[in-house]
Structures are given as structure tokens and as C-alpha cells.
């Protein structure tokens, strides 16, 4: 558990996946990214899939839902998923029932961030994973996601969100939004045009769940480094530039969604004045030994 003033944060690793570094590093050559991350014998790099529970003002707010338990065995094998369903396991270990979640914020609707919106029952049917929650995402994100194109249709899977909108459980946002006192969602475009990140502020302390504005810590250090999945990479660069300034000014705790080596840290300037993420030891609030 991380405390930011009066706000409690719990970090879950929903899934561990091994992916092609071409996706995670895009145009960055191997000779550079391999200084920070090591590929295995399959030429895959390990990534995490972080989701965040925020407890504030009597509310339970869940930021992203990961894959949950909805991937079949063949899908897990194809995507090299070595553990899964960590968010639900983490909530259970904290004594938080799915019915206790008040708000689910889908930062964006790529399948690795929102497949866990639903739960696969023992009978094989899908039902909302958090039956009493109000699900939130940006209107532009939803419109893009229900009309995917050749570039996005592999990750925008309507079954993960369209039924929630049709039932009235998913509310569409138009711009930045305060979720609770001290907790706000901000549009940080680039990865997708309406991608969101989350800021937390209480008692003079600050934190941020950056989501895929900076999937890895090194993405936040280096403005020109970003994934191949970003649909507007030059916009991502400018989003990061603005948030770098904010992070330096506030000494914010930064959480990176896919970094298995450096899940959290603070941005500082090194002896040459370059921004670097100083890692902070942090323990997951869910078991990962399965």
C-alpha cells in the first residue's frame, strides 16, 4: 500500500506477459534499449500489466482492469502470459469484493487494459466484473473503439466495453474529470487520441498513474522513446513534455503500467541536467507466484 496524504493506493500486477521488443520500443534500436531491458532466448521482453486501486473519501476507484480471467488457455499461450487475473486476486486479498468497487476508470480501451471489465463465469458466459461500479472512459475513445480500423481492430474488441454502454453502466466523459477529492483523470493524447492518465494529490503529496503515455520508465525519461502502438507519436511526445515539467515541480510518485523492472519512481535531473526516473521499491498488493 502507498499513502499519498489521506489517499491509499494499491498496486496490482494483473498479468505478466512476454512481448516482442519491436512493439514496446518502436523506432528505438536494439543497441539502445538493450542497455535497460534484456530479451530472453525467444527475443521477448518481460512486461507487467499494472492496475491501481484508489481508496479515497469512502470510495473504491479501480484504474484499468487488465485481462482478468477472460483469456482462454490458447490466448494466454499465444500472448506468452505467465500469470493472470492478478487484480481480482489482489482485491480478494484486501477483502474488497467486486461489488465494493464504485468507479472503474478505463484509461483507454485497448484489450490489455479493459478485458477485465468482464468476468468469465464457470458456465463460460461473460458478466460485468464489477456489478455496482460506474465505468468511465472518454467519449472520443469509445467512438474510436467501436469503429476500429485496420491498425486498431486487433486491440479494440467491442465485447470488452460495448455491452456496458448499451446497459447504461458505462458513462462517456468529455475531457478532464475529477473522480473524487484529490483524484482526477486527464486526457493525455498520443497513445490514442483520448487516452487518459490519473493524478492523485493529498496533503501536499502527488502521484500519477501515467498509463501508456509512458508504458515504461525509460519512455518517460526520453521524450523520443515510445511504443510502436502509439497512433499519434508526436502528440505523445508533447504530452510527456508537459507531464515531465509537472513531475519535476511536484516530486510526484510515478507509476508505469507495463514496467516489470521499475514499476514506480520519481523523476529527477541527473548531474548533466537530464531527466531520469529514480526507482522506488514497491511491493505489489497481490500474489504473483502462480
Image (spheres, helix red, strand yellow):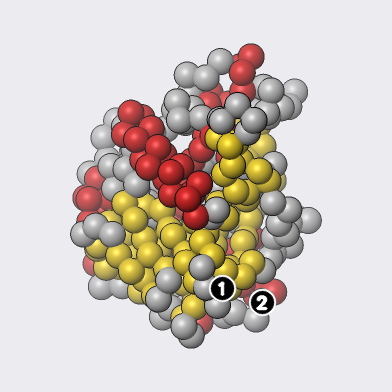
Q: Position of residue 68 (x, y in %)?
A: 55, 59
45 relative position to 250: left or right: right
Which residue ends up furthest to the right in the rendered image? 289
What residue is shown at x 52% (from left), y 19% (from top)?
28
For label 2, the SS is: loop
Q: Nearer the viewer, residue 5 or 255?
A: 5
Of residue 41 and residue 171, the one placed in the foreground of this image is 171
User: Is 71 situated left or right of 35 in this image?
Assistant: left
Query: Residue at left 39%, top 75%?
Result: 180
- Above or below — where is 121 with respect to 64? below
Which numbered disc flags the more N-terminal residue, 1 or 2?
1
x, y percentage for residue 36? 67, 28
Residue receiving disc 2: 94
The residue identified by callout 1 is: 5
Q: In front here: 48 or 179?
A: 179
Q: Is residue 82 left or right of residue 72?
A: right
Does residue 129 appear in the picture of this structure?
no
For the C terminus, the quadrant is bottom right
**Residue at the farthest bottom position:** 58
Question: Where is residue 83 shown, x and y percent of the image?
Answer: 68, 51
Please tell me which residue is depicted at 56% across the width and 73% down the height of the picture. 5
Mark 1, secondary structure of its residue: loop
Residue at the image position 64 percent from the left and 67 percent from the top:
2
Residue 235: mark: none
Amino acid at each position: 500500500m502507498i499513502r499519498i496524504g489521506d489517499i491509499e493506493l494499491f498496486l496490482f500486477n494483473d498479468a505478466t506477459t512476454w512481448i516482442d521488443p519491436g512493439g514496446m520500443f518502436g523506432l528505438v534500436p536494439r543497441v539502445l534499449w538493450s542497455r535497460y531491458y534484456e530479451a530472453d532466448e525467444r527475443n521477448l521482453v518481460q512486461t507487467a500489466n499494472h492496475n491501481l486501486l484508489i481508496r479515497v473519501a469512502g470510495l473504491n476507484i479501480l484504474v484499468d482492469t487488465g485481462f482478468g480471467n477472460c483469456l482462454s488457455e490458447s490466448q494466454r499461450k499465444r500472448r506468452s502470459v505467465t500469470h493472470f487475473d492478478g487484480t481480482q486476486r489482489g482485491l480478494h486479498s484486501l477483502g474488497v469484493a467486486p461489488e465494493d468497487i464504485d468507479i472503474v476508470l478505463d484509461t483507454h480501451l485497448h484489450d490489455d487494459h479493459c478485458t477485465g471489465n468482464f468476468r468469465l463465469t464457470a458456465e463460460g458466459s461473460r458478466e460485468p466484473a464489477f456489478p455496482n461500479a460506474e465505468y468511465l472512459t472518454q467519449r472520443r475513445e469509445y467512438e474510436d473503439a467501436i469503429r476500429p480500423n485496420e491498425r486498431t481492430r486487433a486491440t479494440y474488441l467491442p465485447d470488452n466495453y460495448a455491452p456496458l454502454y448499451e446497459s447504461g453502466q458505462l458513462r462517456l466523459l468529455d475531457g478532464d474529470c475529477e473522480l473524487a477529492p484529490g483524484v482526477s483523470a486527464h486526457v493525455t493524447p498520443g497513445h490514442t487520441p483520448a487516452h487518459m492518465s490519473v493524478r492523485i494529490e493529498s496533503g501536499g503529496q502527488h502521484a500519477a498513474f501515467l498509463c501508456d503515455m509512458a508504458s515504461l520508465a525509460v519512455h518517460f525519461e526520453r521524450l523520443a522513446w515510445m511504443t510502436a502502438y502509439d497512433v499519434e507519436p508526436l502528440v505523445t511526445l508533447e504530452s510527456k513534455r508537459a507531464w515531465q515539467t509537472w513531475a519535476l515541480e511536484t516530486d510526484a510518485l510515478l507509476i508505469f503500467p507495463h514496467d516489470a523492472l521499475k514499476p514506480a519512481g520519481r523523476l529527477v535531473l541527473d548531474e548533466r541536467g537530464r531527466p531520469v526516473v529514480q526507482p522506488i521499491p514497491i511491493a505489489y498488493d497481490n500474489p504473483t507466484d502462480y
